[in-house]
Amino acid sequence: MSTCKLNRISAAITQPKSQGASQAMLYATGMTEQDMDKAQIGIASVWYDGNPCNRHLLELAGWVKQGVAEADMIGMRFNTVGVSDAISMGTRGMSYSLQSRDLIADSIETVMGGQWYDGLITIPGCDKNMPGV
């Protein structure tokens, strides 16, 4: 019976001695030597204070991070943009709502690829954010 390593993606930066600078940056975030063998999970939320649909998502992402830690993995929270067309309705600002979906998707993909995370949990806050995540 074979086993699947949960950190098969992040191992590219956490395992080789040639990635010492990358590992130093991770240690600076509070990770330990034991943490370097754990899967890293990106937790992407569309949190921001400017929309009642999104205000609570930072706290929710904290709970998700706690659950990831309880599963013996490392949770790394990050945010992306969000636009509320309910607030910008009737103004030129409303035109940014639909295009924000691509920006949300692109920013999540960028963080996930650039940081070599092993998995992703997304936390959108409204109907305009969900297609992006």
Image (spheres, helix red, strand yellow):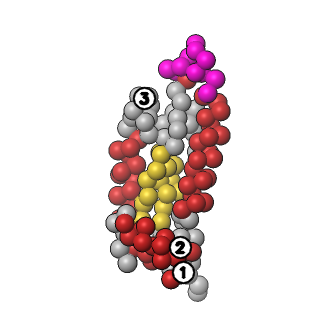
Query: On the picture, is 88 further left or further right than 23?
Result: right
**Foreground: disc 1 or disc 3:** 1
- Residue reaching furthest to the front: 21
**Separation of residues labelled 3 and 2 (CA atoms):** 36 Å
- Residue span colored magenta: 86-96
- Seen from the viewer's position, the closer of residues 83 and 60 is 83
* Mark carried by residue 57: none
Residue position marked by numbered label 2 in the rendering: 13
Task: Kindly identify the amino acid type of the residue bearing the numbered disc 1.
Answer: Ser
Q: Earlier in the sequence, mark 1 or mark 3?
A: 1
**Foreground: disc 3 or disc 2:** 2
Helix, strand or loop status at disc 1: helix
**Separation of residues labelled 2 and 1 (CA atoms):** 9 Å
Residue 14 visible, this angle: no
Residue 62 x, y percent position in the rendering: 36, 51
Occupied quadrant, residue 71: bottom left
Q: Residues within 10 Å of mark 3 (few under 14, many from 20)?
A: few
Q: Residues within 10 Å of mark 1 (few under 14, many from 20)?
A: few
Residue position marked by numbered label 1 in the rendering: 18
- Residue reaching furthest to the bottom: 1
Task: Kindly identify the amino acid type of the residue bearing the numbered disc 3.
Answer: Gly
Residue position marked by numbered label 3 in the rendering: 50
